[in-house]
Image: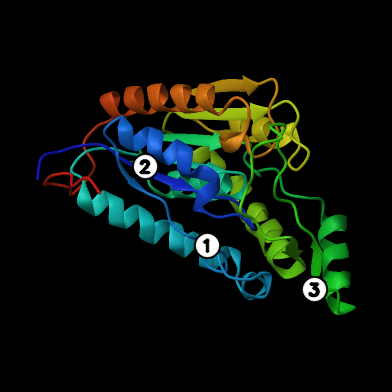
Amino acid sequence: MAAGPGALVVHGLTGSPQSVAGLAAAFEKAGFDVEVPLLPGHGTSPEDLAGMSWADWEAAVAEAYAAVAGRVGGPVVIGGLSVGGALAAGLAADRPEVAGLVAVNPMIDPPAASFQALLGDLLAAGERFLPGIGGDMADPDAHEDAYDRLPVAALLSTCRGLDALAPRLQAVGCPVLVVTSRHDHVIPIVSSDALAAAASGPVERLWLERSGHVATLDLERDELEARAVAFARAAAATAGPRPGTRGTARRR
């Protein structure tokens, strides 16, 4: 196997790989060996998601990273949308060999303790679901495959995962591209700012003036994909060798 770059792309909470398929395809067209995992509890039913936790999603992302890293002998860039961006950031903090991080409207800033307490109260009262959060886009022709309900337990687990992630973000030493939509109605811009401020590696910002939360499917998706590919190519080109790797990339 000849050395080549890899890419891992992670979807968000209640979504699916469909929401990041365009970005994944752009990486693949650019010569990256791409892995796009389906996070546990997704692609089936909201009831299934209610039984999963942040630890399950972290484990799935780590497994997907190991899969693509095992196929390639070159650097691996990771990216994610929303909660997928937070999971990708956590992986980058844990894996100093990661070549670069692309975070699209990442959910980084932990919700307030009072909000988390409210979620706990809802669960205690038997309220298992909130309205869905998918489909926040300005493009009237775009569609996201996402659940129409958000499990309270899954959201609470996400909040606690973000609490644990916050102090680890300074360990993100790779180059970072933070993509932020001006009209995101799901995740406040402060989350993007928090990642940009905390990461110890060089940070680039891309502001999308017309897009909603699911920017990977929205009006400026072409711009997003082009910038992400250019960033990933540069990050891969300047990355050092991954520890303990040898062999060649196999295109999927």
Q: Residue at x 64, y 58 (%)?
A: 14
What SS does tag 1 mark? helix
Q: Residue at x 39, y 38 (%)?
A: 25
The residue beneath circle 3 is 128
The answer to which of marks 1 and 3 sits earlier in the sequence is: 1
Q: Hey, what amino acid is under mark 3?
A: Arg
* Residue 213 x, y percent position in the rendering: 68, 38
The residue beneath circle 1 is 57
Q: Hey, what amino acid is under mark 2?
A: Pro
* Tag in front: 2 or 3: 3
* Residue 83 x, y percent position in the rendering: 61, 49
Vertical comparison of 83 with 131: above or below: above
Q: Is residue 233 left or right of residue 56?
A: left
Q: Residue at x 82, y 56 (%)?
A: 113
The residue beneath circle 2 is 96
Q: Is residue 243 left or right of residue 18?
A: left
